[in-house]
Amino acid sequence: MGSFSLMHWLLLGVVAILLLGGGRFSNMMGDVAKGIKQFKKGMSEDDEAEKPATRIEGKAAPEPTVQREAEPAREEKL
């Protein structure tokens, strides 16, 4: 008695379409589909970014973390 049967779900779907209208319901489902596509695209971009560089492409030299100031030139006394 606690679960819904297939007939209950179909009746609920028909009532939802009648209340919301066919156009609004299809627009909502289209928005859901677009969201899923964007999610999949974002996930695939993350995978591509993690690929290591090949030997041909090489890697850029890391930037120095500490900058030293040039020391003043010393004059030797003779």
Image: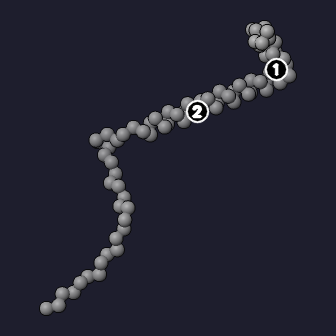
Which residue does the numbered mark 2 point to in the structure image?
39
Residue at 81% across / 16% down in the picture? 12
Looking at the picture, tell me which residue is in the foreground, 23 or 1: 1
Judge from the rendering whether residue 64 lies leftward or rightward of residue 20; answer left or right.
left
- Residue 75 lies in what quarter of the image? bottom left
At label 2, counting other C-alpha atoms closer than 10 Å, the crowd grade (few under 14, some 14-19, many 20 or more) is few
Residue at 74% across / 27% down in the picture? 27
Residue 70 rendering spot, x and y as whole percentages: 31, 75
Q: Tell me if I can see residue 14 in this picture.
A: yes
Judge from the rendering whether residue 38 lies leftward or rightward of residue 65; answer left or right.
right
Which element is circle 1 on? helix
Question: Considering the image in quadrants, where does the N terminus appear?
Answer: top right
Q: Residue furthest front?
A: 1
Q: Is residue 41 above or below residue 22?
A: below
Q: Amino acid at mark 2?
A: Phe
Judge from the rendering whether residue 47 lies leftward or rightward of residue 30; answer left or right.
left
Q: Is residue 4 above or below residue 49?
A: above
Residue at 58% across / 33% down in the picture? 39
